[in-house]
Amino acid sequence: MPMGVSAVAVMIMLMVGKVSEWVPGLLPIPLVKIAFLFAAISAYRNRAALAAVRVRSLRIARPAIAFMTLALLSVLFSIYKSQTLIGSQLILILLLSMTLLLKVTQTLRDVARLLAGFAWAAASLCVGLLLHYHGGRAEINENFDPNAIAYALDTALPIVLALRARQSRLGRLVVSALALAMVLSVLLTGSRGGAIGLGVVAAATLVLPLSYDRNGALKRFSLARSLVKCAIAIAAVALAWGLLPEDTQTRMATLVNLQKDYSADANLKGSRWAIWQRDVGMALKRPIGYGLGTAEAVDGLGGGQYRAAHNCLVQAFVELGALGLWLYLYTYYTAWRHLGRIPPHPHSSSGDDGARTALYARAICVALAGNLAAGFFLSEAYSPALWMLVATAAALVRISAPAPDRAAAVVPAAASAQTMIAGVRN
């Protein structure tokens, strides 16, 4: 199913990289919908050769599907139904896209194509940001929040680093250049949450290297190598710091001096600390939640200035209640747990596929860590970068599972005549 998977990879690039929102002339064209239809039609035409997957049987996908379903059903208890209905369009697209991804991804090579989609998305964001940079805090246009750009780049960076492995010399050079451009782009956005997420990714890759050793196996942690990399990173940061715009330096400096950061001032209604306190207090008064897309309205009802939650956890808690918050956190936990069960150093008999599976699993774990760290300061609870990555993780875990476990999630090919139709119901 290479055509279907390639179409899903393009869909990831379009959803996460938002190509149509900065390339002139593309905005009126529904590129994501076109890519989805192309992938769905390709899957239907190749249904005889495509093993149908019971999405509900994939443990790693269950909390994600449940979270999305709860978001759609929140219209029943929403205090702002029109806003919830507007937000439901994105949720429905994500739910269908995740289901399609799980249906068409059949091999490790398919997973590699999906990860390449994240890399192309990162390239889109970097190119758009650098082309539109004219000093000060970097942004693309009114369709992009600099913080959201940094969030997506933090999520994709470990994927890009993992894709460097086993590339040709020229390929490694190109991918390395993209990784450096991503780091520079995150810094230029002036996003402090993005900088923290970037730091988490850097620390995690020191402990969990995203490359192979000379024998073709996944590298193990080395204290000496980590100290050398830390020294190089500190020197690079010191060199880059002087090249950053003055306002970016001022914003980043508040990370080590919270007294000068307005976000930590509880006396300011617009500070993030004050917003979190108000929103959590309102969520505790109504544990079932206020409905998808209502966080700003809830902040106003709590005496605030109708501000966004600026925190994925707070956003999920306010809008989808205690159950939504639990499902959101449980999604990360389940993904880490199941990806962690993939042997980091597979037996030599598993060959190259075993090493690649371990590398991809490790990269997604690091990506989720960076995603959660950056998301702690942003309202990105429904971001395509997160949920498409979770779906990719679920596909990788299913493919890497032993034969008996894999069979539990797959139905016979003869029963897949209406795979895509039944898949949406599942």
Image (cartoon, rainbow, N blue to C red):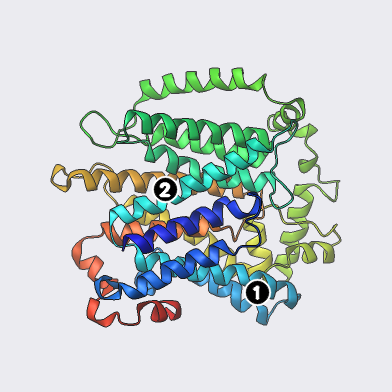
Q: Is residue 8 above or below residue 361?
A: below
Estimate the x, y position of residue 120 in percent, counting from the top left: 48, 46
| Left or right of 389 on screen, residue 239 | right
Instruction: Classify residue 306 by image quadrant.
Output: bottom right
Mark 1: which amino acid?
Ile
Estimate the x, y position of residue 382 in percent, counting from the top left: 59, 61
The circle drawn on residue 116 is 2
Task: Report whether residue 242 is seen.
Answer: yes
Q: Crowding at label 1, few (<14), some or many (≥20) Cα neighbours within 10 Å? A: some
* Quadrant of the snapshot with the N terminus: bottom left
Q: Residue at x 41, y 81 (%)?
A: 421
Q: Residue at x 59, y 65 (%)?
A: 30
Q: Residue at x 70, y 37 (%)?
A: 138
Instruction: Classify residue 198 by image quadrant.
Output: top right
* Quadrant of the snapshot with the C terminus: bottom left
User: Helix, strand or loop at disc 2?
Assistant: helix
Name the residue tied to disc 1.
288
Q: Crowding at label 2, few (<14), some or many (≥20) Cα neighbours within 10 Å? A: many
Disc nearer the start of the sequence (1/2): 2
Mark 2: which amino acid?
Ala
Q: Are marks 1 and 2 in contact (CB under 8 Å)?
A: no
Outermost residue toward the front in this view: 25
| Left or right of 344 on screen, residue 323 | right
Instruction: Classify residue 373 by image quadrant.
Output: top right
The circle drawn on residue 356 is none
User: Helix, strand or loop at disc 1?
Assistant: loop
Estimate the x, y position of residue 75 in percent, counting from the top left: 67, 78
Task: Report whether residue 332 is seen.
Answer: no
Q: Nearer the viewer, residue 171 or 27?
A: 27
